[in-house]
Amino acid sequence: MKLYGMTPSGNCWKPAVLMKQLAIPFEWVEVDILKGESRTPEFLKKNPNGRVPLLEVAPGKYLAESNAMLCYLAEGSAFLPADKYARAIVLEWLFFEQYSHEPYIATVRFWVKFLHKGEEWKDKIADAMKKGYAALDVMEKQLAQTNFLAGNSYSIADIALYAYTHVAHEGGYDLSAYPALKAWMRRLEQTPMFFPMQARAAA
Amino acid sequence: MKLYGMTPSGNCWKPAVLMKQLAIPFEWVEVDILKGESRTPEFLKKNPNGRVPLLEVAPGKYLAESNAMLCYLAEGSAFLPADKYARAIVLEWLFFEQYSHEPYIATVRFWVKFLHKGEEWKDKIADAMKKGYAALDVMEKQLAQTNFLAGNSYSIADIALYAYTHVAHEGGYDLSAYPALKAWMRRLEQTPMFFPMQARAAA
């Protein structure tokens, strides 16, 4: 399998860490979205939505959307429970991540760290952060009760939410009021074959 | 099962139409988010994220996130393929919907139709519409090739994307340049036991 991604992207890290943890070999192809490399005619043939990550599951057979990849790769493993309701709860967190978390946590980090708009977009960032903290509150409430998001077992829900939570501070988020969340991140980093997201030197 | 929802919400319509089409009986409980009914202490106990729809799959056992509900309800039916890659493509569309489509198509409709901010938020709306049209472009490209989004069979991907596409014009979107999209909507409305989203008189 080939994974097209950008190293400092949390969405791209998600399928990469899962494949490491499941011992699935893959080739990483670096795509720099800041240089427009995900919007070239050639790339748009692979993914008409022009985004990374993109997984080539077999030659010429593509899958987009990081969380769809997590489901695809985790199928049949302990990372995605077989029980119907338990599986639905994992999916609930995956959709929560893309709708209520990523657009505020990841986006603010992108604005601040990659576009350097921390000052210029101050008001817009403050608005987004209200929603970001609301998402973190939901996670904290759950993690005060269970070791992992979908219960007491590590699952792809944790991978999906860790991706941008652990770099939230790069956008200016202060996690000091989130003890359960912080303990969960440390717990997650202890899982077998965990590998950290690498910030590129240029970032 | 009990479905907590708001009638004019596309997200709430999704599990409702699927249950009709799968002949799963359910009770509908109206929740008016404009009156804050999804943010009461009582409702937050059911869903800490304070959103509808919310599905009570068994007494006291809740599931949030409309697209997680679609997966849960469609499991084992023709609406969610068993083949691993085909299933992943359905999920790809579900995540696309929540990340690249709903925040622009549904949100603009909400601003214009429910908050009456069409004039006041003109610039913000124009910005959002650019991304909304980009999402519609991706759908059009696919639907020019296949009868339904995930191939030639009707699936929960179609339900998820139809929800706000068919009311996009209420936010000011012009679909005249999207012939395949329009034909797809008509095709979808012909599926057995389809039932339309009802706009409440008050909306």
Image (cartoon, coloured by chain):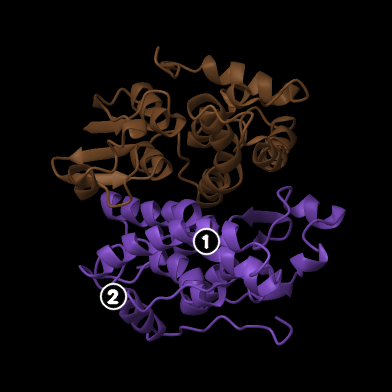
Chain colours: A purple, B brown
Q: Can you identify the residue that label 2 sits on? A: A180
Residue hosting label 1: A126
Q: Quadrant of the N terminus of chain A?
A: bottom right
Is residue A112 toward the left or the right of residue A83 in the image? right
What is the count of numbered marks?
2
Residue A61 lies, with reference to residue B102, above or below; the image says below
Could you say where residue A93 lies in the image, as x and y percent from the top left? 38, 56
Chain at numbered mark 2: A
Closer-to-camera residue (B63/B121): B121
For the point 74% across and 74% down, the residue is A30
- Residue furthest out toward the left: B59
**The C terminus of chain A is located in which quarter?**
bottom right
Residue nearer the viewer, A14 or B45: B45
> Residue B194, located in which quarter of the rendered image?
top left
In the displayed structure image, the side of residue B109 where residue A203 appears, left or right: right
Q: Residue furthest right?
A: A41
What is the chain letter for disc 1? Answer: A
The crowd level at tag 1 (other Cα within 10 Å; few <14, some 14-19, many 20+) is few
Q: Would you identify the image quadrant in which residue B104 lies?
A: top right
Camera-side residue of B124 and B153? B124
Give, as a three-letter code, the residue at label 1: Ala
Is residue A107 visible from the viewing direction of this image?
no
Front tag of 2 and 1: 1
Please report the residue visible at 72 percent of the width from the left and 60 percent of the height from the top. A59
Q: Position of residue A200 (x, y in %)?
A: 68, 83
Please determine whether, in this image, residue A19 is positioned above or below residue B40: below
Residue A81 picture location, percent across and down: 32, 60
Whether residue B38 can be seen here: yes
| Residue type marked 2 | Ala
Q: Return the residue nearer the eye: A19 or B104.
A: B104
Query: Quick check: B28 left or right of A94?
Result: left
The secondary structure type at the circle numbered 1 is: helix
